[in-house]
Image (spheres, rainbow, N blue to C red):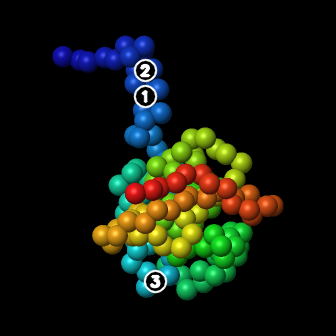
Amino acid sequence: MKRTVRPLVAGALLALLATSAWAEQPVVEMYQDPNCGCCGAWADHLEAEGFTVERHKTREMRAIKIEQGLTPELASCHTAVVDGYVIEGHVPAADIHRLLEERPDVAGLSVPGMPHGSPGMETGRVDDYRVLGWHRDDRTPEIFSEYTH
């Protein structure tokens, strides 16, 4: 027996797929020091949330951060680029999904330092932390989201 999908049902299914977690996400290009373990754990977190992560190991992290417009106040261990946005440090996948959905006028998102309890830093201790957004011409950060425990 041949099965057909009616156009209305097919259209609704395509719309659902386009707006769901099943929709294809842009590739995350992640740069990390070859000796860093938490960077890989963060990439695993993103992959579990539907992202494809291309991992690049390099000893030139300072140069990459400068090239991406990151100040020392915004810096963390790894730097990523996704769909034109810079992602610095242990930014949760939910915030990256929100960034890509809302498309705010920011250069990127950062979780400065390496707060315990952030994705990739699950050490048993949980710190409060903020996800910051910044603009390339004015690097004064603004709060994008906060995590308190």
Q: As shown in the figure, which amino acid type bears the numbered disc 1?
A: Leu
Residue 139 position by quadrant: bottom right
Quarter of the picture containing the N terminus is top left
**Counting residues from the N terminus, which is met first, the one under dot 2 or under dot 3?**
2
Left or right of 18, for residue 120: left
Quarter of the picture containing the C terminus is bottom left
Name the element at disc 3.
Answer: loop
Q: Which percent across, then down, holds residue 134?
A: 69, 59
Q: As shown in the figure, which amino acid type bears the numbered disc 2?
A: Ala
**Cβ–Cβ under 8 Å for marks 1 and 2:** yes
Mark on residue 147? none
Mark 2 to mark 3 CA distance (whole Å)? 45 Å
* Residue 90 visible in the snapshot: yes
Q: Which percent across, then down, holds residue 45?
A: 38, 60
- The residue positioned 43% from the left and 35% from the top of the image is 20
- Residue at numbered disc 1: 16
As rendered, which of 128 and 37 lies closer to the eye?
Answer: 128
Mark 1 to mark 2 CA distance (whole Å)? 6 Å
Residue 131 position by quadrant: bottom right
Residue 87 position by quadrant: bottom right
Q: Which percent across, then down, holds residue 49?
A: 39, 51
Mark 3 to mark 1 CA distance (whole Å)? 39 Å
- The residue positioned 60% from the left and 73% from the top of the image is 75
Left or right of 37, for residue 74: right
- Residue at numbered disc 2: 12
**Cβ–Cβ under 8 Å for marks 3 and 1:** no
Name the element at disc 1.
Answer: helix
Neighbourhood count class around disc 2 (C-alpha, 10 Å): few under 14, some 14–19, many 20 upward: few
- Residue at numbered disc 3: 34
- The residue positioned 55% from the left and 65% from the top of the image is 111
Neighbourhood count class around disc 3 (C-alpha, 10 Å): few under 14, some 14–19, many 20 upward: few
Name the element at disc 2.
Answer: helix
